[in-house]
Amino acid sequence: MAILLGSIADDYTGASDLANTLTKNGLRTVQTVGIPDPTLALPDVDAVVVSLKIRSVPAPDAVTAATRAERWLRQRGAGHVLYKICSTFDSTDAGNIGPVTEALSEAAGGGSVLVTPAFPETGRTVYLGHLFVGSQPLNESPLKDHPLNPMHDANLVRVLARQSRNAVGLVDLTAIAAGPDAVKAKLDALRTAGVTIAIADAIFERDLETLGEIALETPVSTGASGLGLGLARALVRSGRISSGGATTADAIRPVGGLSAIVAGSCSKATLRQLDVAERSMPVLRLDPERLLAGPDEVATAISWAGDRISAGPVVIAASAAPETVSRLQSLYGREASGHAIETATSIITAELVQRGVRRLVIAGGETSGAAVDRLAIPAFLIGPEIAPGVPVLRTVGNTQGDMLLALKSGNFGGEDFFTAALAMMH
Ligand SMILES: Nc1ncnc2c1ncn2[C@@H]1O[C@H](COP(=O)(O)OP(=O)(O)O)[C@@H](O)[C@H]1O
Ligand SMILES: O=C(O)[C@H](O)C(=O)COP(=O)(O)O
């Protein structure tokens, strides 16, 4: 399998988001969960997105996992590797966007690295290095209340510099609007000043097409799905994509079985989606303190689901509003409570699959990672898009048989996302 484009995603929802974008823009794509076993039969593709769960782990661990994945991708022909991060730049001053970006670049021999989380389709734009979520600067958006990495600074040059060893530059919109030569000149000037990593502005897809063309001439870039769009379109324009484009038909074939939704995201969008879902299906709101106190809440949830699941889809949610999350974290700690709840929701998910669920929606990046790891799913084919950034996924090599999943980024999807997702999965 010789591929043209590789990507390493820092969480599983972000991986499926990017895989969706690459597929929509003409690249046959597969999403793997970590580095796949050599015996796993993968389809012939143009791009591979390796999902890792490294957004919120210690930076040295993230660097080790990411550089291993980069080597695997290069061995399979990837000339360019995109480090897929969150479109809201989810990270802390400890990383991991800076440390991983620097490590991937060093492993690839250095050189300029463009960094942009812009993803206009979902309202993520960057101007003079400042990230906007819709009309709000990042630090005034709901991302300021994220349970694991609350974002308090919209100036990404500052944010990235605080978590990097080296200085961080800016390629501003004026250069990007002037075209590829101007961007190259800006990068050359930064390199002359000793700066190789630069935040790039982007407001529209045309800006991302310019950035993708330049990035493709370098070995590494860092960004969200918008940069993936630019890279994919540059590859198609270059004539290097020999296939007749990507199809999702294989992925969406029915799998049957029961259906369920598990939510761990505490994003504003997910909380709204849960409220709307409650109008049409049973929703169990887990008690997070009981989840942390012992196994009883998990057992109660499994029993509750067992009584209902044969009659139709159920929703089991740990998700809570920011003030509730903060109170729990003050009692049990941010990382400890997050990890414990991810573990609990992953156990519940595995028990649902044991009871016949084969069509599964999981809301939340870390929540999805914990659940997919417990299910030991090795890879996914990419199906049709449910909502911007969220495709249907079909398992590859799953020991319990084919399943259809949607790994929903916390912030993505309309208020009816859960019913819309299940309506596409049969
Ligand atoms: N009620 C709660 N209180 C505190 N933390 C929670 C609660 N429910 C879920 N969490 C944790 O919040 C984090 C949500 O992260 P994630 O799943 O990545 O969602 P998102 O995609 O919105 O970022 C996870 O660590 C999850 O375990
Ligand atoms: O927002 C994005 O770019 C990605 O879809 C992503 O990384 C989402 O992460 P989350 O933790 O699921 O919000």
Image: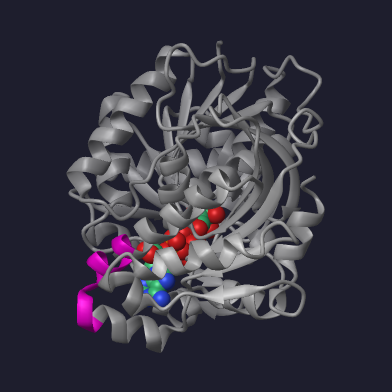
* Magenta residue span: 330-340
- The answer to which quarter of the image holds residue 74 is top left
Tell me where residue 264 appears, x and y as whole percent. Answer: 47, 65
Q: Where residue 198 sits: x, y (%)?
A: 38, 49
The spot of residue 123 in percent (x, y) is 63, 66
Above or below 154: residue 103: above
For the point 48% across and 26% down, the residue is 80
Q: Is residue 330 above or below residue 371?
A: below
Instruction: Report if residue 417 lies within the magenta region.
Output: no
Q: Position of residue 200 (x, y in %)?
A: 47, 53
Is 301 displayed left or right of 343 in the figure?
Answer: right
Determine the residue positioned at 40% across, 46% down: 10
Task: Describe residue 41's horizontal placement relative to residue 70 as left or right.
Answer: right
Q: Does any portion of residue 71 appear in the rendered image?
A: yes
- Direction from residue 281 to residue 187 in the image, left or right: left
Q: Quadrant of the N terminus?
A: top right
Which residue is located at x 76 percent, y 41 percent? 256
- Is residue 293 left or right of 382 when viewed as pictured? left
Q: Quadrant of residue 295?
A: bottom left
Q: Is residue 88 visible?
A: no
Colour setting: one colour
Q: Is residue 334 on the magenta stretch?
A: yes
Query: What secondary structure is the stretch in magenta mostly built from?
Result: helix
Asked if 165 appears above or below 322 in the picture, the reply is: above
Count every numbered label the image shows and give the total.
0
Residue 330 or residue 164, whichever sits in front: 330
169 is higher (above) or lower (below) than 274? above
Residue shown at the point (80%, 45%) measured from the top left: 426
